[in-house]
């Protein structure tokens, strides 16, 4: 399997992460595609993760091609210097737009910290008789499982996300995709916009919403 390049220069490489794969080996996953290992073989050089996506999430993922670039991009992510856009299929008719500002507890430090996710509903309809919304999300912070937990808090869990209340009657994995990353390289002023489409299973399920007009409910 060859990973799809979305962008590459001397410091950075972006690929499409398929759902079901993991970004790096941490001992908790076996018999799955490990992107860091696979990409290292594909480009025949060391690579360095600079952020992560959950196993069930597909979409844009970045790796640095040297240690200096890795430190730079990790700092950029931590300092909110990168905009990330996701789309998700969620249960129910989510409000047309809004901002979720519920603080979230960390995975390790167990301390609640500010967390903000902005969202906009793209479409609403029914799949197998169940009301479903297609929504675009932009996390302004980067807390652990932020989007998934915020959508659960709002009462609209992601389809297939059983960890946070999503059912599996329509999808058997988390219907969340990182579709775009925007960043500006401070040293050069160069703006990068790196985009991808969701996996085919996501597209197949979301296509069932075609023909349903936007709801006027909020």
Image (tube, rainbow, N blue to C red):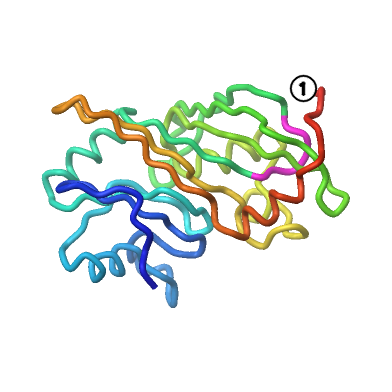
Report which quarter residue 93 is drawn in.
top right
At 41% from the left and 48% from the top, the residue drawn is 60
Residue 34 in magenta stretch: no
Quadrant housing the C terminus: top right
Comparing 136 with 3, the one in front is: 3
- Pointer 1 local density, CA inside 10 Å: few below 14, some 14–19, many at least 20: few
80, above or below 212, in the image: above
* Residue 27, percent from left and from top: 36, 69
At 53% from the left and 29% from the top, the residue drawn is 117
The span picked out in magenta is 89-94
Residue at which label 1 appears: 218
At 78% from the left and 39% from the top, the residue drawn is 92
**Left or right position of 176 against 213:** left
Per the image, label 1 sits on a secondary structure element best described as loop
**Left or right position of 167 against 36:** right
Quadrant housing the N terminus: bottom left
Comparing 197 with 169, the one in front is: 197
Comparing 15 with 81, the one in front is: 15
209, above or below 217, in the image: below
């Amino acid at each position: 399997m060859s990973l799809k390049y979305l962008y590459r220069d001397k410091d950075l490489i972006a690929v499409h992460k398929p759902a079901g794969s993991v970004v790096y080996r941490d001992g908790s996953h076996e018999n799955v595609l490990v992107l860091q290992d696979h990409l290292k073989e594909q480009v025949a050089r060391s690579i360095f993760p600079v952020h992560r996506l959950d196993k069930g999430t597909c979409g844009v993922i970045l790796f640095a091609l040297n240690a200096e670039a890795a430190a730079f991009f990790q700092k950029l992510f931590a300092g909110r210097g990168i905009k990330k856009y996701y789309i998700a299929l969620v249960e129910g008719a989510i409000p047309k737009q809004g901002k979720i500002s519920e603080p979230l507890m960390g995975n390790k430090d167990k301390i609640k910290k500010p967390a903000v996710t902005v969202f906009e509903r793209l479409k609403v309809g029914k799949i197998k008789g169940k009301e479903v919304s297609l929504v675009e999300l932009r996390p302004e912070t980067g807390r652990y499982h932020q989007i998934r937990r915020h959508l659960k808090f709002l009462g609209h869990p992601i389809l297939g996300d059983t960890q946070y209340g999503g059912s599996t009657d329509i999808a058997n994995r988390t219907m969340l995709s990182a579709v775009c990353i925007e960043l500006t390289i401070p040293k050069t002023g160069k703006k990068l916009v790196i985009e991808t489409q969701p996996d085919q299973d996501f597209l197949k399920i979301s296509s069932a919403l075609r023909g349903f007009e936007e709801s006027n409910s909020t």
